[in-house]
Every structure is written in C-alpha cells, then in structure tokens.
Amino acid sequence: MNISNVLIQVDNVCDYIPVVSSVTNLVVIFQKYVVMPNLKESNIVNNHYFIHLQNKNTVRCVVLLLPVLGNIFVAIYVLFFRLEE
C-alpha cells in the first residue's frame, strides 16, 4: 500500500470524526485551491491522492468545517442516499 492510498483512507475516515473532520477538510480545501493549482498537471494525474482531492465535493468539505453539525448532516446525507440505492 502506498502513501496516497493511506492518505485517501485517512481522509475518508476523518470525515466522520467531529472536530478532526473540520481540520482535515480545511487542509483539503487549502490543498485543492492553493497547492494543486501550482502543481504540474502530470504530477496531479499521476498521484491518486490528488485525484481523490479533485473528485471530493467542495460543498461536503465546507459542511464538514462545522464541528458536529457538519458530521451529522453528512451522515444523514450518506445514509439517505445509500438507502435509495
């Protein structure tokens, strides 16, 4: 398992931990809108973690900046759409 896969798993797990999700999603937003635009496209395409960040919904990241309430909203959203499938 490489570091990109570990970072992706950590990011996915942290989305459900109150307060931790606020910090990790602040980092995600920073990486997505400050760091990644300054990288070469080839570096982004070849890195699974950066692809994960590109595909991560920005609205979800912003909602998760709200400790506890953001986690509740995301959990309800995920449960609702999994039940629909």
Image (spheres, rainbow, N blue to C red):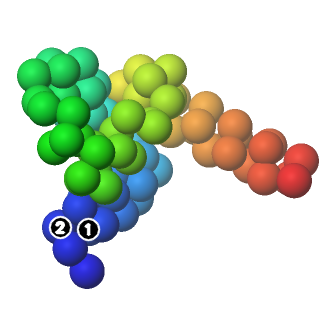
Question: From the viewer's perspective, is residue 35 above or below residue 6?
Answer: above
Return the residue nearer the eye: 46 or 22.
46
- Tell whether 34 sits left or right of 51: left
How crowded is the residue under tag 1: few (<14 C-alpha within 10 Å), some, or many (20+)?
few
Mark 1 touches mark 2? (CB < 8 Å): yes
Question: At numbered mark 2, what does the secondary structure look like: helix, strand or loop?
Answer: helix
- Tell whether 8 sits left or right of 58: left
Give the residue at the far right of this rendering.
Answer: 84
Spatial CA span between label 1 and label 2: 5 Å
Quadrant of image for the N terminus: bottom left
What amino acid is found at the position of numbered circle 1 in the picture? Val
Residue wearing tag 2: 3
How crowded is the residue under tag 2: few (<14 C-alpha within 10 Å), some, or many (20+)?
few
Residue for point 36% across, 25% down: 65
Tell me if I can see residue 31 in this picture.
no
Percent position of residue 53, x then y? 34, 39
Percent position of residue 37, x then y? 18, 21
